[in-house]
Image: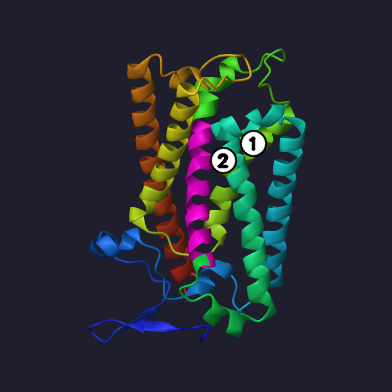
Amino acid sequence: MGENKNLIKNDGETVPHQQPLSLSEELRRENFGLQHHAPEDFLRSQWQSGLTSRWFLGYRWLLGIFFGTGVISCLAKYHHNGRWFIYLTDWGFLLCGITSVSGAILVTIHHWNPQRMGERFRNNWQIKAYWVCYWINLIFANVIALVYWTCIYPQDRDPSNPAYFTDLYNIWTHALPPIFFSVDHLIVAQPTRLLHFVYPLAFGWLYTGFTFIYYVMGGLDLKGRRYIYNVLNYSKPREALFTIGAISALSVVVSTLHYGVYRMRTFLARKLGKLQ
């Protein structure tokens, strides 16, 4: 596996292997899947020149430690007898920790022996799982922040509220993830697929299914109510369905916008000679 492994198109033109697909190619059914011919793209920065980079490795571990520490400390402080796990914010924050720590581990493995590990990761489930987690995390970090700051925050700042977060954890869980991971999306070399909106969409529906089962089984939130969020109260099915539809649409829009960020990143990389 060479560093400058290029692809030959049908017309004989040699193009960088990181060249984005055309729109017609993006919309092919197989691009719902998780196939990519260069697994090392998930283990390096768009802007590094060599097979490995100590700077990128250090950056990956700083991100992993930051969010890994955040998840552990937040869970310890706000466990609430397991009810920490009923909130979408906490699902998203947990995913921040999983994604950032697993990314650091994978880059470390690659850094140790880049030639051998590139072949090892080819069509490997670890890279595919990381790709799914990364994309869901990126999209829902933004979705959660948008919904929280517009719909929930104004009623959420009463210190007597049992679900209250201190300002530190409020910023850590609701403000920093969309900022840090959106910037990260400009740093990494991995591809983005337009049709991968299905993964954050499925994640949102999974959480919706959990909240409905929790409601049917009589689960209570920290205030003793039979719903977790005012906007997702199944005793008001029309409002709940509207919320589900709005969040689903928002996740697709955010996913499409971040596909645009990927295209911008690769455009700049090509102009600067960094597209491998």
- Tag of residue 92: 2
Looking at the image, residue 81 sits to the left or right of residue 201; the answer is right
Residue 248 appears at what percent x and percent y?
A: 37, 36
User: Mark 1 highlights which residue?
Assistant: 173
Labels 1 and 2 touching (C-beta < 8 A): yes
Q: Earlier in the sequence, mark 1 or mark 2?
A: 2
Residue 151 appears at what percent x and percent y?
A: 50, 21
Q: Nearer the viewer, residue 124 or 210?
A: 210
| Magenta region, residue range | 126-146
Could one spot residue 223 in this view of the protein?
yes
Residue 234 appears at what percent x and percent y?
A: 41, 19
On the image, which quarter does residue 106 sit in? bottom right
For label 1, the crowd category at 10 Å Cα-Cα, with few meaning under 14, some 14 to 19 and many 20 or more, is: many
The type of residue carrying mark 2 is Gly
For label 2, the crowd category at 10 Å Cα-Cα, with few meaning under 14, some 14 to 19 and many 20 or more, is: many
The type of residue carrying mark 1 is Thr
Could one spot residue 274 in this view of the protein?
no
Q: Residue at x 70, y 27 (%)?
A: 80
